[in-house]
Image (cartoon, rainbow, N blue to C red):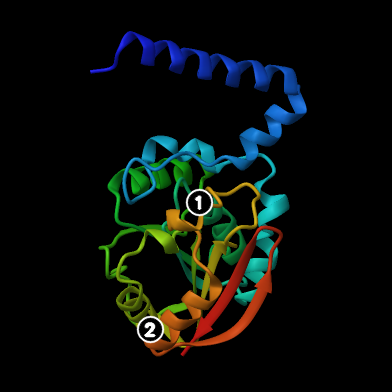
């Protein structure tokens, strides 16, 4: 039970917080909105918060063209978007590979795949195939991918070595895996900088997982708030 005195204290704290935001002005409020990520209600990103992944400045700081170039994604490529959310990157990949290419949008949450289907239909794209995977296996065809991309989803995977090993089976001999994640403690429009929260994984940890899965680091790219590791066999 919460006592009356406790409630009064909480009301005062909330009121002080609201006043501070109002007095800070519109620029401060905008910065706060861009740098605070939605709180997770469980281990996976909640589908009801998909709209929060679509900030208007996302392309400016995430550098999608730089990411796709580093992975060698071109017209006719067959690629996978692992954990695509509402399909922001899926659409960019589909346009890059063109009608002769294929994008496998893989997720383990059915609501995410339904969101992808609706978006792809609105965009009039016919080269996207939603795929329902599992926590340890993306369930993709063997040896068909030129590239697989994992943007901001690596922290949500429990058995990362097994997942990477299974994902690598879908690669062509020269295929690449791109892992994009927020840098620990670097701020920006990502999740909390609290390292104990587990939602920011240091690149060294990813490299260790890759080696354990039989993969090697082919390239490293530095993004404004994130890193990109390019892995291959």
Q: Is residue 19 left or right of residue 200?
A: right
Q: CA distance from mark 2 to mark 1?
A: 24 Å
At x 49%, y 49%, the residue is 87
Q: Is residue 77 above or below residue 60?
A: below
The percent position of residue 169, horizontal first and vertical second, equals 35, 83
Q: Quadrant of residue 9?
A: top left
Q: Is residue 15 above or below residue 189?
A: above
The percent position of residue 209, horizontal first and vertical second, equals 41, 80
At x 44%, y 59%, the residue is 153
Q: Quadrant of residue 16?
A: top right
Contact? badges 2 and 1 (CB < 8 Å): no
Point out the residue furthest to the front here. Answer: 5
Q: Is residue 123 above or below residue 128?
A: above
At x 53%, y 48%, the residue is 192
Q: In this view of the protein, which residue sits in the foreground, 51 or 122?
A: 51
Q: How many marks?
A: 2
Query: Dot 2: within a 10 Å radius of its alpha carbon, few (fewer than 14), some, or many (20 or more) residues?
Result: some
Q: In this view of the protein, which residue sits in the foreground, 194 or 63?
A: 194
Q: In this view of the protein, which residue sits in the foreground, 145 or 194?
A: 194
User: Can you tell which mark lies on residue 125?
Assistant: 1
The percent position of residue 133, horizontal first and vertical second, equals 28, 62
User: Can you tell which mark lies on residue 206?
Assistant: none
Residue under circle 2?
Answer: 143
Q: In this view of the protein, which residue sits in the foreground, 143 or 16?
A: 16
């Amino acid at each position: 039970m919460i006592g009356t005195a406790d409630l009064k204290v909480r009301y005062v704290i909330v009121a002080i917080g609201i006043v501070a935001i109002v007095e800070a002005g519109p620029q401060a409020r905008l910065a706060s909105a861009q740098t605070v990520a939605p709180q997770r209600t469980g281990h996976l990103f909640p589908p009801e918060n998909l709209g929060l992944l679509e900030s208007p400045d996302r392309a400016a700081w995430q550098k999608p063209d730089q990411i796709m170039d580093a992975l060698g994604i071109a017209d006719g490529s067959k690629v996978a978007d692992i954990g695509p959310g509402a399909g922001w990157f899926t659409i960019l990949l589909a346009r890059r590979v063109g009608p002769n290419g294929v994008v496998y949008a893989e997720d383990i949450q059915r609501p995410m795949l339904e969101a992808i289907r609706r978006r792809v239909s609105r965009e009039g794209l016919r080269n996207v195939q939603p795929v329902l995977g599992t926590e340890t296996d993306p369930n993709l065809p063997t040896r068909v991918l030129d590239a697989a991309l994992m943007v901001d989803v690596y922290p949500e995977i429990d058995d990362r070595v097994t997942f990477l090993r299974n994902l690598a089976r879908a690669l062509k001999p020269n295929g690449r895996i791109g892992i994009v994640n927020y840098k620990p403690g670097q701020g920006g429009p990502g999740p909390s900088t609290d390292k104990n929260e587990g939602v920011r994984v240091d690149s060294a940890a990813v490299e260790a997982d890759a080696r354990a899965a039989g993969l090697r680091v082919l390239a490293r790219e530095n993004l404004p708030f994130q890193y990109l590791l390019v892995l291959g066999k």
